[in-house]
Image (spheres, rainbow, N blue to C red):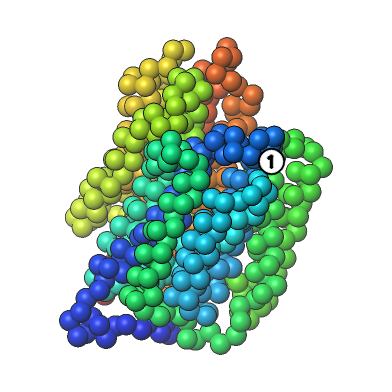
């Protein structure tokens, strides 16, 4: 177990005087987490429309609207969480939310494609600050008896945002692609006002030294280089000089980070964190689970748009039934947890259902796509699996960590998730290759993709068994 250190939490007086603001705090934190996660996926549906908004832009250049966000977000999560533990989670949350909101507004009015890419990177920096701090504030601000259920609600809001991205994006694109970014502004402003009024301060009072800045830079470089190699490897060629250079840079940076973590008095990641069983297995499981989910969602969208010729809005509506299952079975999972079913078992069941859903889609796939028989049954099963898995996975990941390390721990878990999404998309692209809607091997490509996703889902179900049970609040 990691040694606990003093955590300063302001605002507890409100509860002691009978003014319980925990529901409002939960609403503010969930709204911010929902918005940040939604943006990761909603832009995918607007990608074609954004291309039309910048005539003459190549597909390679347009890809940076997606890839730039992914790379910066993955690279900055852990450094941002570590800094928040030291300097204050509320300050980190407010700064991240403000940057994300302003960058969203700027994205809608980017004069050129590369201005848009730059504003997307700024968006990602804001999201990297607010994501781990939102969970850190949740765990330190909520009453002990409500922490586990509150984390499940927070996790459910994030997972619903991930799955609803195509639905909301499809509707907004019908108005204008700029609304994909503008929709964040009113949500961000309201959440910012609520956060300033409601959130208590929270930080690790025992840390007096600034966390290892050099290690933070190296860690950001390592994750950024790895994500860059993965998202561009198909285009550059996996054996190309650019791809190999990015992988080499990542390996060298990771090796440097390990040395800094072992030798520095205030490392960017406390090595003792990985000795916590639930935290270690939760990270491995999150990486595998999000690899499967990161591949299956775009595979369904691609199958509907390229093979069934659905519009963006129709595709979004077709995807919607899966997300509907998430909050329903998250609630079912919470009831089962109260009756003694371990968190690891619930996550394993959920991941197994994701694997089963992908296998059902592979078995049901046909040359002439029929949504009701080919995709819907498997997609509903996957939605049930996500409902069981993701809320319990995120709730368990940091529950055994001391309050002083929750932001850093949350950042590590979210980095595992983000890298999983990158791995998933990379795996999907590698399997599909140059498959197009009219090609003879389109069906084979999608079928192979779903079998691969099922295999990864089975692996994540196996690692979930190592998580164990969630510690009950004292």
Q: Which part of the image, by quadrant, shows the N terminus?
A: bottom left
- Residue at 42 percent of width and 46 percent of height: 162
Tell which of 165 and 370 is nearer to you: 165
Q: How many marks?
A: 1
Q: Give the image location of residue 429, x and y in percent.
A: 60, 32
- Residue at 27 percent of width and 61 percent of height: 149
Q: Which part of the image, by quadrant, shows the C terminus?
A: bottom left
- Residue at 63 percent of width and 26 percent of height: 433
18 to 316, vertically: above or below: below
What crowding class fits label 1: few (fewer than 14 Cα within 10 Å), some (14-19), or many (20 or more)?
A: few
Residue 323 image-quadrant placement: top left
Q: Is residue 330 left or right of residue 314?
A: left
- Residue at 57 percent of width and 61 percent of height: 125
Q: Which residue is mark 1?
A: 61
> Helix or strand or loop: what does disc 1 sit on?
helix
Q: Give the image location of residue 276, x and y in percent.
A: 46, 66
Tell which of 160 and 338 is nearer to you: 160
Q: Residue 409, can we see it?
A: no
Q: Give the image location of residue 43, x and y in percent.
A: 51, 43
């Amino acid at each position: 177990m990691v040694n606990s250190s003093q955590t300063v939490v302001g605002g507890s007086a409100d509860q002691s005087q009978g003014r319980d603001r925990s529901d409002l705090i939960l609403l503010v934190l969930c709204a911010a987490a929902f918005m940040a996660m939604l943006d990761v996926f909603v832009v995918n549906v607007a990608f074609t429309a954004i291309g039309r908004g910048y005539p003459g832009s190549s597909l390679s250049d347009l890809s940076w609207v997606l890839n730039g966000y992914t790379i910066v977000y993955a690279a900055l999560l852990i450094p941002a969480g570590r800094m928040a533990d030291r300097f204050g989670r509320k300050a980190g949350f407010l700064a991240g939310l403000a940057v994300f909101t302003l960058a969203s507004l700027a994205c809608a009015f980017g004069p050129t494609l590369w201005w848009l890419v730059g504003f997307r990177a700024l968006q990602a920096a804001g999201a990297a600050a607010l994501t781990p701090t939102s969970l850190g504030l949740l765990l330190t601000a909520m009453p002990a008896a409500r922490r586990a259920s509150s984390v499940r609600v927070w996790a459910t809001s994030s997972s619903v945002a991930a799955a609803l991205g195509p639905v909301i994006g499809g509707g907004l694109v019908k108005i204008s692609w700029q609304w994909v970014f503008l929709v964040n502004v009113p949500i961000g402003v309201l959440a910012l006002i609520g956060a300033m009024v409601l959130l208590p301060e929270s930080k690790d009072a025992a840390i007096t030294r600034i966390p290892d800045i050099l290690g933070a830079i190296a860690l950001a470089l390592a994750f950024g280089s790895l994500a860059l190699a993965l998202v561009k490897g198909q285009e550059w060629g996996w054996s190309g000089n650019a791809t190999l250079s990015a992988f080499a840079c990542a390996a060298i940076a990771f090796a440097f980070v390990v040395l800094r973590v072992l030798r520095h008095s205030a490392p960017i990641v406390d090595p003792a964190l990985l000795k916590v069983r639930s935290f270690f297995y939760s990270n491995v499981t999150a990486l595998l689970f999000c690899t499967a989910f990161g591949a299956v969602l775009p595979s369904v969208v691609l199958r509907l748009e390229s093979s069934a010729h659905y519009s963006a809005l129709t595709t979004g509506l077709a995807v919607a039934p899966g997300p509907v299952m998430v909050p329903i079975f998250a609630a079912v999972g919470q009831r089962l947890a109260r009756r003694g079913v371990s968190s690891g078992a619930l996550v394993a069941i959920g991941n197994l259902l994701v694997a089963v859903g992908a296998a059902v889609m592979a078995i049901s796939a046909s040359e002439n796509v029929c949504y009701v028989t080919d995709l819907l049954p498997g997609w509903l099963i996957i939605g049930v699996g996500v409902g069981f898995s993701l809320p319990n996975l995120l709730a368990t990941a940091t529950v055994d960590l001391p309050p002083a390390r929750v932001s850093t721990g949350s950042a590590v878990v979210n980095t595992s998730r983000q890298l999983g999404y990158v791995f998933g998309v990379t795996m999907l692209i590698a399997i599909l290759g140059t498959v197009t809607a009219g090609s003879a091997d389109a069906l084979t490509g999608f079928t192979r993709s779903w079998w691969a996703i099922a295999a990864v889902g089975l692996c994540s179900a196996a690692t979930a068994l190592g998580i164990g049970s969630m510690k009950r609040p004292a």
